[in-house]
Amino acid sequence: MIGLVLSLLVTQTPLQTYSDAFIQQSRRTDPQMSYTVTVRSADRSAYFVELRITNPPSPARLVIPNWAPGAYRLMDSGQNIAAFTASTTTGDTVPVTRDSDISWVVDTRGAASIVVRYSAGLRDPVPWRRPNNRWFLRATSGMIDGPRTYMYLDGWKLAPAHVTFRLPAGWRIATGLVATTDSTTYWAPSYDVLIDSPVLVGHFLDYRFSAGGRPHRAVVDLGGVRPHAAREFVDMVRRVSETAIGIFGSAPYKDYTYIFVAGRGGGLEHLNSTTIGVTEDVLARRPSGAESVSAHEFFHTWNVKRIRPVELGPFDYEHPVRTLNLWLSEGVTDYYTEVILARSGLNSVADFTRRMGDAIANHRGNAARLVVSPERSSWTTWDSPEVNNSYTISYYLQGQLLGFLLDLAIRDSTDNAKSLDDVMRYLFDHYAGERGFTSDELRAAIRTAAGPDFQDFWRRYVSGTTEIPWDDFVKTAGWSVRFVEQSAVDARISSITPAVQGGRWRAVAIPGSAAAAAGLVTGDELVRINGRDIVDGSDVSAVVRGVAAGRPVTIQVVRGGQPVTIRFTAGSYGQMRAVLADLPEVTDRMRRIRASLVTGH
Ligand SMILES: [Zn+2]
């Protein structure tokens, strides 16, 4: 009875900002969230989650996010949840209704605390056990993906949370979450931070190093394989870290955790950690193969995790969130990947020049550059390529080149006194708080930090699709771009991510390619190419690379629910190549700008 009176008298006000979450975390009437994630020794079919909520609102609506920050597509995540129940702490079950595919409403009946239980895992056991950089569970290890594992209490995403891991004997934990005095329990200041902190559990290698005066950890899940190049591996990660920190002057976190898994994936950025899936061969023997993805994900620590478009947070996890600026968040991060590798000495200046030349060639060789602007490709990332008449161009590529152009133009107009580094530092100083930047603020930031007004540049190359006059820009550093067409094998097939989680990767039929002429249609779901099962895009590029001229190619796809087979013979086409060549006369100023760009000094 007393409990009931109290809950009527004390009103709960949902937290509005991140600082509320910090200031008010001890208010006793707010919901207190405590998760327990269990890996059962005898049942690895899912993670078993228990969520204890003290002072729950009634009704309490629990939601599993439908997308994850950094991976801009819907996950159809409700299908991964099973056996949802809710009870009071004394064990009495309370009514639950499901009000959408991703949300459950608990009638708490005025209980002072409730316990919600569910299992979270892919229903298909084969992908569930397959190691990758996002979410899996197998005999020796597992990765816990926050957005697909932890439900949030609607209205209370900014409330702090504890999470405890109950694991098989001998399993260890690696995560960016804040440790507590209990080695199995961690703390997060808000739900956003909780799910932005993936957790590797199980058996893994553990390396520690210092960069920028802060502790860094690199854990490697090699599935029991022996590392043959551990020293080179740690040296690579340390150099990447030191160089990126050097661009900004200091690290914006207390500690950082790199999580590497020998398996599939790629990388995903998080607040003070990253998860990277690369092949066992790279991790065990050839760490240079992980340089680019490590530099890219680590640079995100600033660009996107802190310097972010205003739309990207606080997050709405139920609906797609669109922004015009993924070219900056992802593509300029790709430009800085090249800059970091050059400045750290992991790549030579010649490597930098060659790789930028390759990017220019990829851009010039893609007809979509004159159709889909960088802002447009950012905005339509959630959509089928059909919204752009099946023209596809990556905002990673577009943004990498825009970063290069901006850097060159700023250095040119300021006689190398300023550079894109100044813009990134300015953005970090002004937009790393609770609110991100708008497109107008981004343009204003460039003008304030670097001097020139980029209004025309924006209209032509960011919002528009004007052909880039390369020589006008690269001459600043003593280069000109030489385009040449080389005969190459035409088994060209591009691919894009599945429309839904667990779905098949989709084909992109490149205009003018032999595959398109033979009937491949953009959006076809890829099943098999030349007998190889297509699990993800890396299978597509591997099989395409292996086809010789004149050899048959067989593509099995699903189109409109029906199996379709496309056959053609690999022909040849004029592949665009581009070389950044020295101008006949490279002046001292050009030399100075080039040296500064690749050394940072
Ligand atoms: Zn990225």
Image (tube, rainbow, N blue to C red):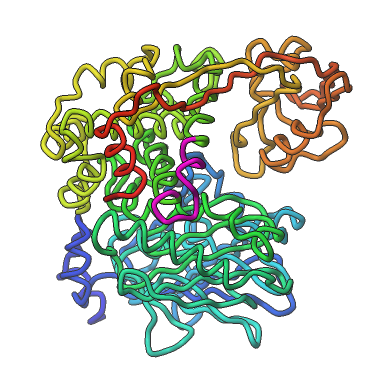
Residue 227 counted in the magenta span: no
Residue 266: horizontal and vertical position, in percent? 57, 50
Q: Nearer the viewer, residue 406 or 152?
A: 406
Query: Which quadrant does the N terminus fall into?
Result: bottom left
Residue ranking furthest to the bottom: 181
Question: Is residue 63 visible in this depiction of the protein?
Answer: no
Q: Nearer the viewer, residue 256 or 486?
A: 486
The residue drawn where x is 74% and y is 38% is 542
Magenta residue span? 342-353
> Does residue 438 appear left or right of residue 265 in this picture?
left
Quarter of the image for residue 481 reads: top left
Residue 462: horizontal and vertical position, in percent? 32, 23
Question: Looking at the image, in which quadrant does ligand 1 appear?
Answer: top left
Residue 345 counted in the magenta span: yes
Q: How many marks?
A: 0
> Does residue 533 appear left or right of residue 6 in this picture?
right
The residue drawn where x is 17% and y is 65% is 11
Residue 15: horizontal and vertical position, in percent? 21, 59
Q: Is residue 304 above or below residue 138?
A: above
Quarter of the image for residue 13 reads: bottom left
Q: Is residue 31 above or below residue 348?
A: below
The residue drawn where x is 64% and y is 57% is 132
Q: Nearer the viewer, residue 4 or 302?
A: 302
The residue drawn where x is 23% and y is 34% is 411
